[in-house]
Image (cartoon, helix red, strand yellow):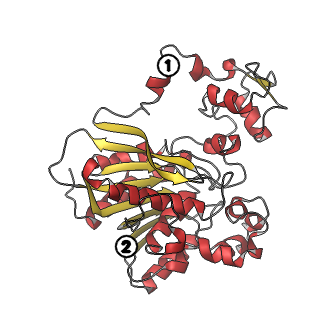
Amino acid sequence: MNLQSVLTTTLCLGGLLADAVDSQAQSPQAQSPRIPFAEVLRREDANRDGRVTKDEFKGPPRLFQRLDRNRDDALTREDFPIANRPNTNRRNAGRLNAPDDVTVERDVVFGTGGGRELTMHLVLPKEKSEKPLPVYVWIHGGGWQGGTKDGGVRQVLPLVRSGFVGATIEYRLTGEAAFPAQIEDCKCAIRYLRAHAAKYNLDVDRIAVGGSSAGGHLVALLGTSGGVKELEGNGGWPDQSSRVQAVVDLYGPTDFKTFVTTPGYERHNDAGSPESRLLGGGEVLKKPEGIKQVNPITYVDKDDPPFLIIHGSDDRTVPPNQSELLHKALQAAEVESTLHVIEGAGHGGPQFAQPETRKMQVDFLLKTFQVASPD
């Protein structure tokens, strides 16, 4: 995985915004991204002198400017205040700020992709349950080219506190591999959970997935492509099913052809756009087979699980018609689907963090899986 794939977690670099928009507004005055200094050195310090110059830095210039807090044209420990805090060490950082009422099992290897290990964080309730628990799997956004699984811990917490086991997974980004690598890795994670249901006390018949932006696209695809062999990959646990039983899709892309021809969104057709990179490069409209393959609507049928789809009416990154098209296709196949458009909301942001929006997602999953509300 290249440095840009790691570092674009908290930036919107002309592509889709990572799931971090739920917790931090993107503005020129925003603080530097929380990126470990050791990781920057490991990947970028070509001459191993303990500093990274502009010439050594392979990421976007805009990102270098944000990281270079003291404006000395070099990245050093002074630019990373978190690294200088007393009592901040690898062990403490690994806790992911998890509250006391849950247990986080970090970096559980769930399979392989492209010859390397893939990992997830599992978020488990502290109190043991006598019965197997339903599962909520979060898939991060970031234009398929950035983002990490770490932010998903806070996304699954409300469900873990409502009687679920949570998981937040990594997948190969487009700097490492083009589609279908991303969905293959997601499906592998679902198969792993089923294969290890007894170990973690999981209900294999109640696995839900949620995600935002690019993650929304991948969870929608998980929901509609159950049983599609060409998207399964060979990452592990082939004897298990990758089907899911509920989907929470937050402003995910679906039909790239409609997407890149919608007035105001034409730039996404360009070579180098997130959508182009997902398809392996080049202009999006010149890849009709790729457009069809990545589109969750392609695989919709009557056996698909219930969907909750939420989109902002003023989303300037992914047009609302992407969610509308998916909703209509699901309804046409007589699949339970709810589309909620948040008036005035953009691509993520504070409206999606409002209690009523969070509650809508929790209530949908509690109802779908017939789990009694803890309230």
Relative side of 256 to 298, left or right: right
Callout 2 crowding tier (Cα within 10 Å): few <14, some 14–19, many ≥20: many
Relative side of 369 to 129, left or right: right
Instruction: Name the amino acid, label 2.
Output: Pro
Residue beneath label 1, please? 88
- Tell me where residue 318 appears, x and y as whole percent: 62, 63
In this view, the residue in front, 264 or 372, is 372
Q: Is residue 230 visible?
A: yes
Dividing the picture into quadrants, the one containing residue 51 is: top right
In this view, the residue in front, 162 or 130, is 130
* Element type at mark 2: loop
Q: Is residue 162 visible?
A: no
> At 54% from the left edge and 73% from the top edge, which residue is drawn?
230
Instruction: Name the amino acid, label 1.
Output: Thr
On residue 305, which mark appears? 2
Quadrant location of the N terminus in the rendered image: top right
